[in-house]
Image (spheres, rainbow, N blue to C red):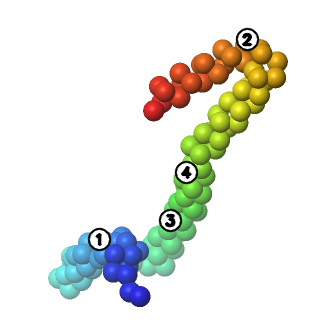
Protein backbone atom coordinates (compact mmCIF):
# COMPACT_ATOMS: atom_id res chain seq x y z
CA UNK A 1 0.00 0.00 0.00
CA UNK A 2 2.69 2.54 1.01
CA UNK A 3 5.88 2.31 -1.04
CA UNK A 4 8.70 4.09 0.80
CA UNK A 5 11.20 3.80 -2.08
CA UNK A 6 8.78 5.36 -4.56
CA UNK A 7 8.06 8.21 -2.15
CA UNK A 8 11.80 8.86 -1.66
CA UNK A 9 12.36 8.92 -5.43
CA UNK A 10 9.51 11.37 -5.88
CA UNK A 11 10.77 13.79 -3.23
CA UNK A 12 14.53 13.22 -3.63
CA UNK A 13 15.25 16.67 -5.08
CA UNK A 14 13.30 18.40 -2.31
CA UNK A 15 15.12 16.35 0.33
CA UNK A 16 18.52 17.23 -1.18
CA UNK A 17 17.71 20.95 -1.50
CA UNK A 18 16.09 21.39 1.94
CA UNK A 19 19.38 21.65 3.94
CA UNK A 20 20.78 24.22 1.49
CA UNK A 21 17.56 26.21 1.67
CA UNK A 22 17.61 26.16 5.47
CA UNK A 23 21.22 27.42 5.50
CA UNK A 24 20.36 30.26 3.10
CA UNK A 25 17.32 31.27 5.18
CA UNK A 26 19.33 31.26 8.42
CA UNK A 27 22.12 33.30 6.80
CA UNK A 28 19.59 35.81 5.43
CA UNK A 29 17.98 36.13 8.85
CA UNK A 30 21.37 36.67 10.54
CA UNK A 31 22.48 39.25 7.97
CA UNK A 32 19.19 41.11 8.38
CA UNK A 33 19.24 40.84 12.18
CA UNK A 34 22.86 42.05 12.46
CA UNK A 35 22.25 44.93 10.03
CA UNK A 36 24.71 43.87 7.32
CA UNK A 37 22.25 44.06 4.42
CA UNK A 38 23.81 45.88 1.47
CA UNK A 39 20.67 46.39 -0.60
CA UNK A 40 17.06 46.47 0.45
CA UNK A 41 14.51 44.42 -1.43
CA UNK A 42 11.94 46.38 -3.38
CA UNK A 43 9.31 45.69 -6.04
CA UNK A 44 11.84 45.95 -8.87
CA UNK A 45 14.11 43.28 -7.38
CA UNK A 46 11.27 40.84 -6.77
CA UNK A 47 9.88 41.37 -10.28
CA UNK A 48 13.33 40.64 -11.77
CA UNK A 49 13.56 37.42 -9.76
CA UNK A 50 10.02 36.42 -10.77
CA UNK A 51 10.76 37.14 -14.44
CA UNK A 52 13.94 35.09 -14.30
CA UNK A 53 12.14 32.13 -12.74
CA UNK A 54 9.39 32.42 -15.37
CA UNK A 55 11.92 32.40 -18.25
CA UNK A 56 13.85 29.50 -16.73
CA UNK A 57 10.58 27.58 -16.52
CA UNK A 58 10.05 28.07 -20.26
CA UNK A 59 13.60 26.99 -21.04
CA UNK A 60 13.41 23.89 -18.87
CA UNK A 61 10.03 22.83 -20.27
CA UNK A 62 11.49 22.91 -23.79
CA UNK A 63 14.48 20.87 -22.72
CA UNK A 64 12.29 18.26 -21.02
CA UNK A 65 10.18 17.69 -24.13
CA UNK A 66 13.37 17.31 -26.21
CA UNK A 67 14.72 14.87 -23.63
CA UNK A 68 11.54 12.78 -23.74
CA UNK A 69 11.65 12.74 -27.54
CA UNK A 70 15.31 11.69 -27.52
CA UNK A 71 14.42 8.61 -25.47
CA UNK A 72 12.40 7.33 -28.44
CA UNK A 73 15.22 7.65 -30.98
CA UNK A 74 17.08 4.34 -30.30
CA UNK A 75 13.88 2.32 -30.59
CA UNK A 76 12.81 4.09 -33.77
CA UNK A 77 16.27 3.63 -35.27
CA UNK A 78 16.25 -0.09 -34.45
CA UNK A 79 12.77 -0.48 -35.95
CA UNK A 80 13.88 1.33 -39.13
CA UNK A 81 16.96 -0.88 -39.50
CA UNK A 82 14.86 -4.00 -38.98
CA UNK A 83 12.35 -2.80 -41.56
CA UNK A 84 15.17 -2.16 -44.04
CA UNK A 85 16.46 -5.67 -43.44
CA UNK A 86 13.01 -7.21 -43.93
CA UNK A 87 12.42 -5.38 -47.21
CA UNK A 88 15.91 -6.18 -48.48
CA UNK A 89 15.47 -9.85 -47.56
CA UNK A 90 12.18 -10.02 -49.49
CA UNK A 91 13.84 -8.39 -52.51
CA UNK A 92 16.72 -10.87 -52.28
CA UNK A 93 14.39 -13.87 -52.05
CA UNK A 94 12.07 -12.59 -54.79
CA UNK A 95 14.56 -11.32 -57.35
CA UNK A 96 17.83 -12.90 -56.17
CA UNK A 97 19.46 -9.46 -56.32
CA UNK A 98 23.19 -9.30 -55.72
CA UNK A 99 22.91 -5.76 -54.32
CA UNK A 100 20.30 -6.91 -51.81
CA UNK A 101 22.59 -9.75 -50.73
CA UNK A 102 25.48 -7.31 -50.26
CA UNK A 103 23.28 -5.08 -48.12
CA UNK A 104 22.17 -8.04 -45.99
CA UNK A 105 25.82 -9.02 -45.42
CA UNK A 106 26.70 -5.41 -44.58
CA UNK A 107 23.81 -5.10 -42.15
CA UNK A 108 24.72 -8.36 -40.41
CA UNK A 109 28.31 -7.12 -39.99
CA UNK A 110 26.95 -3.86 -38.60
CA UNK A 111 24.67 -5.77 -36.22
CA UNK A 112 27.55 -7.83 -34.83
CA UNK A 113 29.75 -4.73 -34.62
CA UNK A 114 27.16 -2.90 -32.49
CA UNK A 115 26.55 -5.84 -30.15
Does the image show residue 94?
Answer: yes
4 or 1: tag closer to the N-terminus: 1
Distance between the Cα atoms at labels 1 and 3? 23 Å
Give yes or no for contact between labels 2 and 1 (Cβ–Cβ under 8 Å): no
Give yes or no for contact between labels 1 and 3 (Cβ–Cβ under 8 Å): no
Q: Which residue is mark 4?
A: 71
4 or 2: tag closer to the N-terminus: 4
Eyeballing the image, is 61 above or below 11?
A: above
Q: Residue furthest right?
A: 95
Residue at horizontal 45%, vertical 32%?
115
Residue at horizontal 50%, vertical 65%?
52
**Residue in front for this viewpoint, 58 or 114:** 114
Q: Which mark is residue 98?
A: 2
Distance between the Cα atoms at labels 4 and 2? 36 Å
Distance between the Cα atoms at labels 4 and 1? 26 Å
Q: At which x and y percent is residue 98?
A: 73, 11
How many neighbours does mark 3 have within 10 angstroms: few (below 14), some (14-19), or many (20 or more)?
A: few
Q: Which residue is mark 1?
A: 16
Q: Which residue is mark 3?
A: 52
**Residue in front for this viewpoint, 92 or 111:** 92
Task: Tell me if 16 is positioned left or right of 74 in this view.
Answer: left
Amino acid sequence: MFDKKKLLMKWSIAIKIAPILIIVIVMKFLIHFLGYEIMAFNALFTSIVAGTVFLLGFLISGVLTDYKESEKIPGELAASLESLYDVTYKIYKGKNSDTAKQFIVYQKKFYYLVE
